Image (cartoon, rainbow, N blue to C red):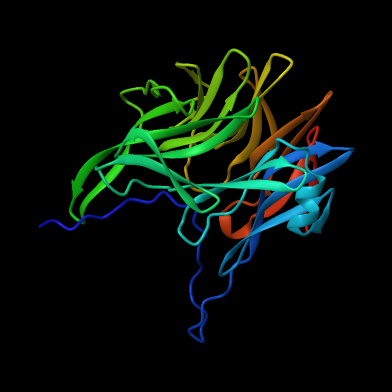
Amino acid sequence: MIKKFFILILISVATSCSNDDGTTPEIEGSFANSIFINNGKVLSSGVEFSNTRTTTYWIDHSAVDSTTFVAALETGSVYRGTVDDAFRKAFVSKTSSVQADLYSFNQGAFTAAGTIGYFKNSNLDTTTISNPGILSAIHFYKQQAYFCGHFSEEVVTEAGAGFRPDIPFFWDGSAEVVELPVSQDAFFRGVSCVFVDEDNFYVGGKMPFPMYWKNTELIQLGSLFGEVNQITVNKGDVYAVGYYNKNDSNSTGNTACYWKNEELVELEDDAQATGIYIDGTDVYVCGSTGRDQASYKACYWKNGVRVALP
């Protein structure tokens, strides 16, 4: 009987070579992945990593604890947490002044049987969507949850059997999924984010180029390697934030940026952007500086001017 292996797409931290004494130096870094403005304060969440990963919070440019951060958030906000001990991506939704819900999503398919599930406050919720596949991200619009994910294809390699991303989809939590088109000559790696407004939905995809879907239309933002990490719509303008690589590389040396209505706005080389928030005429983007993951340092940009986060 062939042993089954599951494929996990993980955000990994690069390790360096051992020292002469045989020990491995500890790598420390950080990145911000969600940003909000409320009552004149800049609220950012992110991750600090060394041997472990920890969700970290900042108000303006000072570190705070989770209780202080969540209390300062506007009700209805959803922020990214870190990957948990079960390698699940975490999203936290503030539902009232005293309550928040934790949503967790597997990063790889586990089985071809049954239906896709996700975790709400550590309890498994099953869906009507057939396996193999996963849900990847969540967004709330008028208090309704919307999801994106992908179906997986079962494959056999020299290492055994496993699953790889195959067909992306959008799901409103009740009806059938909406499958999204993929270019036949593009390597599809999954989906990153979802946003819903009054008339449209948007899903960020992981392709060899930065892109997203507006409803079922594939919108390519450039030809060089890159990725969209968050999408928002403000006064009819569509903002997609992420990075691209001027050397068309998928490893190091990214350029943090966002696209406003498909027009590129660069922020900084050797950096990557993860979250975005529009406050009047001001554009706030969070992410990190650093050429590679071992050197990431959390920061945010206000109208292109960087502010370091401790």
Q: Residue at x 36, y 32 (%)?
A: 128
Q: Position of residue 184 (x, y in %)?
A: 31, 23
Q: Quadrant of the C terminus?
A: bottom right
Quadrant for residue 240, please give it.
top right
Q: Nearer the viewer, residue 111 or 15?
A: 111
Figure check: 39 above or below 196: below
Q: Nearer the viewer, residue 190 or 245?
A: 190
Figure check: 2 above or below 183: below
Q: Residue at x 43, y 47 (%)?
A: 107
The residue most toward the left is 1
Q: Position of residue 151 (x, y in %)?
A: 33, 34
Tag count in the figure? 0
Query: Seen in the image, is 51 located left or right of residue 266?
Result: left
Q: Residue at x 58, y 42 (%)?
A: 254
Quadrant for residue 115, please give it.
top left
Query: Seen in the image, is 295 located left or right of residue 130?
Result: right
Quadrant for residue 5, please give it.
bottom left
Query: Seen in the image, is 59 located left or right of residue 230?
Result: right
